[in-house]
Amino acid sequence: MYYSVPVAYLLWFLGGLGALGLHRFYLRKTGTGFLWLVTGGLGMFGAVYDFLTLPRQVAEANIRAGMREALEMRARESLGESMRHVGAGTAAGPRETIEKVILRTARKNGGYVTPGEVAIEGDVSVDQARAALDKLAGKGYAQMRVRTSGVIVYAFPEFFQDGKTEFEEGI
């Protein structure tokens, strides 16, 4: 919020020629605003002082408002950066594609991956992970299989470490 000299003078005038200190409340000088309100603008000496220095006070208030705004923006940006890196996990960078996350996870898990594992590794929803896995299976890069426990997994034969499987037939 930026302050205006005409508005400050209007509040000075409406506040009993500065005696009520409305212009000081407007400029976020609440401490002296209460002092002006209780003492009648310091016996009108403070009100006259404010009349003469109001443009400078408005400029100072605008500088303070600009600094507040810049600090808030900086805090929001740094919070946004930290939130982006929270979900990055161990190896998933901010620009890593979901396909790369899937392949990295499959290699790490001996060629098998579930949508839940991809969701955790890539900071995506389970539905997005399942859709990406289905897309890769449709292109022939992966096979959909069912564990003996009933869990659906996607197998990437190129990453198999041994010939053992704990799966039923592919779907």
Image (cartoon, rainbow, N blue to C red):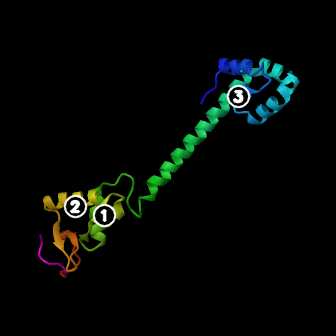
The quadrant of the image that shows the N terminus is: top right
Using the image, tell me which numbered label, if any, was put on residue 133.
2
Task: Provide the residue designation for mark 3.
Answer: 60
Using the image, tell me which numbered label, if any, was put on residue 118.
1
- Name the amino acid, label 1: Val
Q: Is residue 168 magenta?
A: yes
Disc 3 crowd, CA 10 A, few/some/many (<14, 14-19, 20+): some
Q: SS at mark 2?
A: helix
Marks 2 and 1, how far apart in space?
9 Å
Image position, residue 73 (x, y; %): 55, 40
N-term mark: 2 or 1: 1
Q: Is residue 7 above or below residue 170?
A: above
Marks 3 and 1, how far apart in space?
53 Å
Disc 2 crowd, CA 10 A, few/some/many (<14, 14-19, 20+): many
Q: Is residue 134 left or right of residue 79?
A: left
The quadrant of the image that shows the C terminus is: bottom left
N-term mark: 3 or 2: 3
Q: Tell me where residue 19 sits by quadrant.
A: top right
Image position, residue 39 (x, y; %): 85, 29
Give the magenta part as a residue range.
165-171
Q: Is residue 141 left or right of residue 89?
A: left
Q: Is residue 11 left or right of residue 137?
A: right
